[in-house]
């Protein structure tokens, strides 16, 4: 549920859409039957009253929230071939977004299996708390400790110079059901 304006912004003369809408459109275009989607999402009267806006109130506070341990490792899994094909089509969009935002993006199918983004394609994040919440239809975010796998960079690095990461899991809704999850990781500005 990204914040969207009543008039979409444009890039290169084309309207831009939030990832969750692009993903939902791709699932719809693939003709995937509703029974193959995930959990039903209950109606949210507060969300409906804000139409066409879908604001997400800030929920993380580095000063008062607990920083969770590093994200659990993904485990091997098998993605549904139709969702894997959607992921292959959308993977380039995630790469371009990462170049601009310095955030890592993953698209997950309705069962928590990565279908696009990085080297974790074909692995499951279903054991990760924020992903479980998104698969149940709710926005979720966590502050997580970053344990570097390399020595600190010689100069401050925007993408690697912090000890805390922000993880956000956003359900993708299609016809009242969870069609997947947009899962993002970025650095904390203060960590």
Image: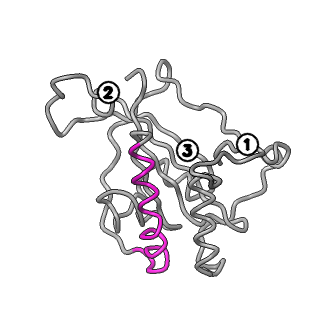
Q: Is residue 121 left or right of residue 184?
A: left
Nearer-the-camera pick, 60 or 182: 182
Q: Which residue is mark 1?
A: 5
Circle nearer the N terminus (2, 1): 1
Nearer-the-camera pick, 8 or 19: 8
Report x, y in % for residue 31: 62, 81
Q: Residues in magenta?
A: 79-99
Total count of labels: 3
Alpha carbons under labels 2 and 3: distance apart: 21 Å
Report x, y in % for residue 29: 62, 76
Alpha carbons under labels 2 and 1: distance apart: 32 Å
Q: Which of the two marks, 2 or 1, is nearer to us in this view?
A: 1
Alpha carbons under labels 1 and 3: distance apart: 22 Å
Name the residue rendered at 72%, 65% in the picture: 176
Q: Secondary structure at mark 3?
A: strand
Q: Which of the two marks, 1 or 3, is nearer to us in this view?
A: 1
- Badge number at residue 165: none
Name the residue rendered at 58%, 79% in the picture: 30
Report x, y in % for residue 122: 34, 68
Q: Secondary structure at mark 2?
A: loop
How dense is the environment of label 2, judged by Cα within 10 Å: few (below 14), some, or many (20 and up)? some
Could you tell me what secondary structure mostly forms the magenta stretch?
A: helix
Q: Which residue is mark 3?
A: 140
Q: Residue furthest top?
A: 63
The quadrant holding residue 92 is bottom left
């Amino acid at each position: 549920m990204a914040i969207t304006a009543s008039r979409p912004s444009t890039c290169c003369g084309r309207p831009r859409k939030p990832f969750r809408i692009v993903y939902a459109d791709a699932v719809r275009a693939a003709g995937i039957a509703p029974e193959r989607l995930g959990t039903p999402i209950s109606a949210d009267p507060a969300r409906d009253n804000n139409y066409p806006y879908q604001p997400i109130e800030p929920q993380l506070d580095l000063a008062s929230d607990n920083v969770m341990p590093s994200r659990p490792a993904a485990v091997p899994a098998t993605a549904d071939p139709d969702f894997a094909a959607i992921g292959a089509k959308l993977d380039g969009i995630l790469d371009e977004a990462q170049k601009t935002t310095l955030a890592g993006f993953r698209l997950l199918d309705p069962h928590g299996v990565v279908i696009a983004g990085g080297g974790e394609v074909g692995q499951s994040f279903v054991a990760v708390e924020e992903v479980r919440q998104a698969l149940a239809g709710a926005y979720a975010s966590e502050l997580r400790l970053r344990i570097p796998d390399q020595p600190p960079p010689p100069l401050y690095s925007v993408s690697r110079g912090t000890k805390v990461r922000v993880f956000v899991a956003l359900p993708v809704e299609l016809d009242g059901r969870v069609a997947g999850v947009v899962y993002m990781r970025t650095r904390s500005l203060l960590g």
